[in-house]
Amino acid sequence: MLRQSHETRKGNPSGLSPRAHRLIQSQHQTPSERRTPTDHRLGTYTVPRRRASEYQLASFRILERIWPLCGDPCGKYLAATISEDIKCRERFDEFGKLSVLLTDEVKAELQCMSAATMNRHPKQFLDAR
């Protein structure tokens, strides 16, 4: 009588190596069934989902406009002075066509936005410039 290997008894009748069998199985799984990216043995990698943005696109458009008007400050300084800057720029109508986007909700989002987020976003804006 032939002795069956451990892998054959577990559902690997093809006779492939355990690693090859796992690789083939993982290709037929949905991303939620696959293992985490830290399991490098399988060769599978699921891309982690990005979190949804807490802020509206209008907030970032206003931030893109106000940032150069303030002299390209760092995020910490901009976060500390954003409410005064918004009032001043709004009073002198320096937003132009973007003044339509400047609602009370957008103002509140900009005042609650962290300095790190304010630093991160203009960096992307600068790369596109």
Image (spheres, rainbow, N blue to C red):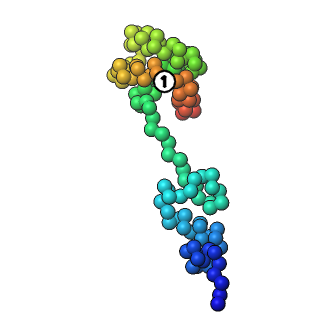
Residue at (57, 73) in percent of width and height: 10
Residue at (65, 84) in percent of width and height: 3
Q: Where's the N terminus, which quadrant? A: bottom right
Residue at (41, 20) in percent of width and height: 108
**Residue 111 drawn at (x, y percent):** 45, 19
Q: Quadrant of residue 43?
A: bottom right
Q: Is residue 80 visible?
A: yes
Helix, strand or loop at disc 1?
loop
For this rendering, which residue is in front, 66 or 8?
Answer: 8
Q: Amino acid type of disc 1?
A: Met
For this rendering, which residue is in front, 121 or 69?
Answer: 121
**Residue 62 drawn at (x, y percent):** 44, 23
For this rendering, which residue is in front, 44 or 6?
Answer: 6
**Residue 93 drawn at (x, y percent):** 39, 13
Q: Which residue is mark 1?
A: 113
Q: Where's the C terminus, which quadrant? A: top right
